[in-house]
Image (cartoon, helix red, strand yellow):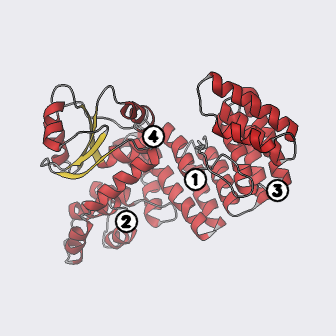
Amino acid sequence: MIFATKLITFNRTHWQMKMIHTSAILLFMGLIGKSLAQEGTGINFFHGTFKEALALAKSQDKLVFMDAYTTWCGPCRRMSANTFPDPNVGNYYNANFINIKVDMEKDEGPQIAGTYGVGSYPTLLYIDGDGKVVYKTAGMRGPEDFIALGQEVMKKIDKSSTYEKMFNEGKRDPETVLAYVKSLNAAGKSPIKVVNEYLSTQKDLTTPANLDIIFEGAREADSKVFDLFLQNKAFYEKTRNPNVIDAKIYQCCMKTFQKSLEYRNEDLLKLSQEKMKSHSSKALEFKYNTDMEYYARTGDAAKFEKATKGFVSKMAGKDANKITQSAQMCIDFFRTNGKLTKLAEQLAGKAVKLDGTPNQYLLYANTLKLNGKYKEAKQQATKGLNIAREKSMPTGGLEQILQELGDR
C-alpha cells in the first residue's frame, strides 16, 4: 500500500518546512481501495439518460449525483482525472448514489442547465428520484472533500429516525430491519446495537434475509456481527462480488484500527491486523502501514522505525513514491529524533535517485538541512529548482529553502 502523501505549502514555526503529511489512514485506504474497487477504480457512472437515472434512483431509494460539466472547463477535467477515479470516492459514491455525468452544452445538457440554474462549472448536483434538488454546489473538490460533501448530503436525507420509530414500535420484520440498518449506515451512525438486538431474537441466523442484515451490520472487526459475517463468508462469496467481500473486511478492520488510535489501545491494533491476516490478501500491507501510523501517532520511535524499515524492504521495492512518503512520515512525527531523521535522509535520497521529482528534491534538501548538511541541502534544492523550472512546475518551496540556506 502506498501512503499517498499530499504536499502543500505551509510555514512551520521553527523549521519552516514546506510539506505536510495528510492523514495516513486516508492514504492507506486509498491504496487498499485501489486494489479492491469494482470495475477498476473510482465512480461507475450511469450511461443512460437523466430521466432513466432518476427512475433508477427512485427504485433503489437513492439520490442521483450529477457532475454538470463542460469539455472546456479545466477544473472539470481535473476532477475527472483526479477525484472521480479515486477508489475511496468510488466505494462511497457507488454505494450511496446513482452517478451521472452530463455535458451542459450537448444533448439534454442545456435543458438540464436551464432547469437547475447551472451557470458555473463543475456544478455538483444531488437530486432525489422526483427530480428535486437536495443539494447543489459548484467548484472542484479533491477526493477527501468530495467524500465529505457526499456524507453531508446523506445526512440531509437521514431516514433512520423513521425506521427507529418503527423498530421501537415492534415492526421488526427482516425487510424493515435491513432498511433501518442501511439508513443508519448512510447517515454515518453505528447499526451494531440494532443488529445485535434483532439477531438475539432469531433462531436461525443463516436465512438469506438475516445474512443480508449481518452483512450490512458488520462495521467493525471487534464485534460479534463481524465474526458472524466471517463465519458465513462462503455464502457471501457465492452471492456477491469477491471484491465487495474484501472491501467489507478491509473497512471493518480499518474501523477497528481507527478505534485503536482513538483509545491508544494496542490490543485493538493487533486485533484488526489479526482479522485481516486470516481473511485478506492485503494483510501484510495492512500490518506494516497500520503499525507505522499507530506508532507514529503514539510516539513509539523504536516500533515506528521497525515498521518503516519493514515496509520499505518488503512493500516499497523501487517505488519512489512509497519511499518518499515513508521519509516524510519520519520527519513529520519524529523530527527531533536524530536516528529517524537520518533514516528520512537515506530514504529521501533513494527516492531522488529512483525518480527525482521537484517535490522529492525538496524533501531530500529538507532532510539534509535538518541533519546539518547545509551544503548538500543547497545542492539538492538547486537541482530540484532547475527541474521544476524546466517542467513549469511550482518553485516556491525550493526557492524558500535556498533562501533559508543562504551562504551556508
The first of marks 3 and 4 along the sequence is 4
- Amino acid marked by disc 3: Asn
Q: Nearer the viewer, residue 370 or 268?
A: 370
Q: Quadrant of residue 90?
A: top left
Secondary structure beneath dot 1 equals: loop
Q: Mark 2 touching mark 4, by CB under 8 A? A: no
The first of marks 4 and 1 along the sequence is 1
Q: In which quadrant of the rendered image does the C terminus lie?
A: top right
| Front position among marks 3 and 4 | 3
Q: Which residue is mark 4?
A: 87
Secondary structure beneath dot 3 equals: loop
Rendered location of residue 94, percent (x, y): 33, 43
- What residue lies at 46% left-to-right and 48% top-to-bottom? 144
Secondary structure beneath dot 4 equals: helix
Question: In 3D space, how far apart are the residues under numbered discs 3 and 4 (Cα atoms)?
Answer: 35 Å
Question: In 3D space, how far apart are the residues under numbered discs 2 and 3 (Cα atoms)?
Answer: 40 Å
Q: Which residue is mark 2?
A: 189
Q: Which residue is mark 1?
A: 23
Rendered location of residue 127, percent (x, y): 20, 48
- Give the class, few, some or many, for how many residues have Cα within 10 Å of label 4's Cα (few <14, many ≥20): many
| Front position among marks 4 and 1 | 1
- Give the class, few, some or many, for how many residues have Cα within 10 Å of label 1's Cα (few <14, many ≥20): few
Q: In which quadrant of the rendered image does the N terminus lie?
A: top right
Question: In 3D space, how far apart are the residues under numbered discs 2 and 4 (Cα atoms)?
Answer: 22 Å
The first of marks 2 and 3 along the sequence is 2
Question: In 3D space, how far apart are the residues under numbered discs 4 and 1 (Cα atoms)?
Answer: 16 Å
Q: Which residue is mark 3?
A: 337
The first of marks 2 and 4 along the sequence is 4
Position of residue 200 in the picture relative to residue 252 (left or right): left
